[in-house]
Image: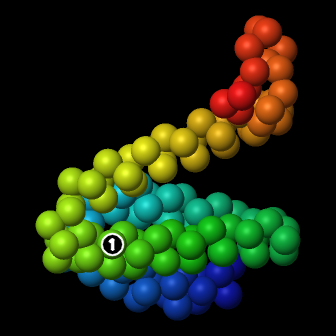
Amino acid sequence: AYHAHLNHFEALPAFAAAVIIAHLAGAPQAWVNGLAAAWVLLRVAYTWAYLADLAGLRSLLWAGALACVAGLFVAAALARWAKSRGRLRYFFFAAAVAAVASARRFSKLAIGIAPGTRSPSSKKMVGGR
């Protein structure tokens, strides 16, 4: 538990910097909040995996938390770029469309429906075909 605790101290500065920079850059607040909440949840799950001695899962959770930090920096960079080009509203729209598309694809995969196959409850094609 002590080593997991130390690992949290190592991860916190990058996370704090990413949140502050994303906020100051004007990144969409919903994205900042979502990535920050995901980071916290992933770090809590990381601690659980560390205590349960699940090395593979622990590594995946660590990588997911790192991806959240990277996502915050990317959101900050894109927000600055969009503001400098006067295209902020287009960035928000494109980000929302991408998030919805990803969520729909993930939910279909999570329930076991492969894209391009028929849904068990209907005769409609799943996956946009």
Residue 14, relative to residue 110: is it above or below? below
Inspect this view and state whether residue 20 appears.
Answer: no
Could you say where residue 28 lies in the image, as x and y percent from the top left? 27, 59
Residue that appears at 49% across and 77% down:
70
Name the one closer to the observer, 89 or 62. 89
Q: How is the image coloured?
A: rainbow
Residue that appears at 51% across and 85% down:
11
Left/right of residue 113 with respect to residue 12 in the rendered view: right
Name the one closer to the observer, 30 or 86. 86
Inspect this view and state whether residue 57 appears.
Answer: yes
SS at mark 1 in the image: helix
Q: In this figure, which residue is indicated by the disc labeled 1? A: 78
Could you say where residue 101 lies in the image, as x and y percent from the top left? 54, 42
Residue that appears at 62% across and 68% down:
64
Q: Residue furthest top?
A: 122
Could you say where residue 5 lies in the image, as x and y percent from the top left? 58, 82
Left/right of residue 75 with respect to residue 29 in the rendered view: right
Could you say where residue 66 lies in the image, as x and y percent from the top left? 57, 77
